[in-house]
Image (cartoon, rainbow, N blue to C red):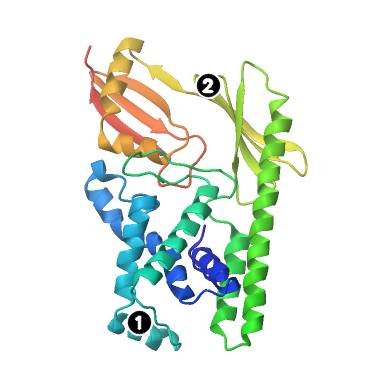
Amino acid sequence: MDFFTHFIVPFAILTLFRVKDRLAGAFGGISIDFDVVLFIIGFISPELFIFTHRGITHSFIFGLVTSTLFLYIISRPRIYGFINYVIKRNVKVKFNWHTILLAYFGVLTHLFLDFLTTGGIPLFYPFSLTRFTANIYYYTDPLTTIAALAVLIILYLRLDPKYKKIALAGFMIMLISFGGIRAYEKMDVIQSQGQTLSDGYTQITAYPTSDMFTWTVVESDGGSKYRIYTYNNLKKTSSDMREVQNLTIKNGTYESAQEAIKYADKLPEVRGFKWEHNYVCINATKKDSIWNITYFDFTASHFGSNELSVKVPSIN
């Protein structure tokens, strides 16, 4: 989800339930997206690939650490004084156990919203690197972003509080409605397309696009090949269909390629690439005594580059 939505959702919930210090929840909701400043760490040290956007801070444990630190910083007089000067509004939050809990509530809403989107988040890090996702929303939803920005503008204006509450309630109703429509559409696509599986394909799943009625469908035979296409559930039409092999080997033996791939899989940049992508297929080409191994994600994931190439000496 987008930055504005992560601010609005906890603020809306706490406002509608008449909770004081609701700004602490809103700031907690955006705090873990400041992980973009950690990108340089992952870039310099590939083995620390968890230091990226939607990485280390997007977990239950480090979300608490991040929101508490963020709340402490933003509650300093010089910081909120500067913010007040820039936005011409009186913004002030306290740092105590009550506001820490509210900030963490904002983190939990953030994690839930990102869980709904494609790509997923490592909720249980450092105990597990596994990303969890419901794949209902696309990484960012344009309509939701525009609506959240509009609500933020309404909150900024000097309007009667009742109009602001109406805007917040309307936004939450819209968000829940969009989520319900997307969940239904995904189930309907999987059910309808699953009845037409053929050519040895036995598994099917669907991934969201920015259009709630258009889905990226992936069929699998269990791991050796995939069929991918775009399906519009309103028009009941398919397009851009293609097949992809999980492993393609050129100019070398299968055994030699497997040894090279096994070695490459231990490289930090490869581990990071696999962690960031839904599907990873391999093209392995041998030239002289070197294997050029290219990892690629045929679903065109939103996260970073969709292709990575490494060179590995031939072992045999």
Label 2 sits on what residue type? Lys
**88 vs 99, nearest the viewer:** 99
**281 vs 54, nearest the viewer:** 54
Residue projecting furthest to the front: 97
Give the residue displayed 56% in from the left and 75% down from the top. Answer: 18
State the SS at label 1: helix
Give the residue displayed 63% in from the left and 60% down from the top. Answer: 175
Q: State whether residue 271 is above or below residue 119.
A: above
Q: State whether residue 306 is above or below residue 7.
A: above
Q: Which mark is residue 225?
A: 2
- Quarter of the view holding residue 237: top right
Mark 2 crowdedness (10 Å alpha carbons): few <14, some 14-19, many ≥20: some
Provide residue 119's location: percent of width, then percent of height: 48, 44
Find the distance from the CA under tag 1 to the CA under tag 2: 55 Å
Give the residue displayed 33% in from the left and 33% down from the top. Answer: 309
Provide residue 263's location: percent of width, then percent of height: 25, 24
Q: Is tag 1's residue or tag 2's residue first in the polypeptide sequence? A: 1
Give the residue displayed 57% in from the left and 89% down from the top. Answer: 158
State the SS at label 2: strand
**Nearer to us: label 1 or label 2:** 1
Q: Badge 1 is on which residue?
A: 80
Say left or right for 182 vs 255: right
- Quarter of the view holding residue 253: top left
Q: Which mark is residue 116?
A: none
- Quarter of the view holding residue 21: bottom left
**120 vs 98, nearest the viewer:** 98
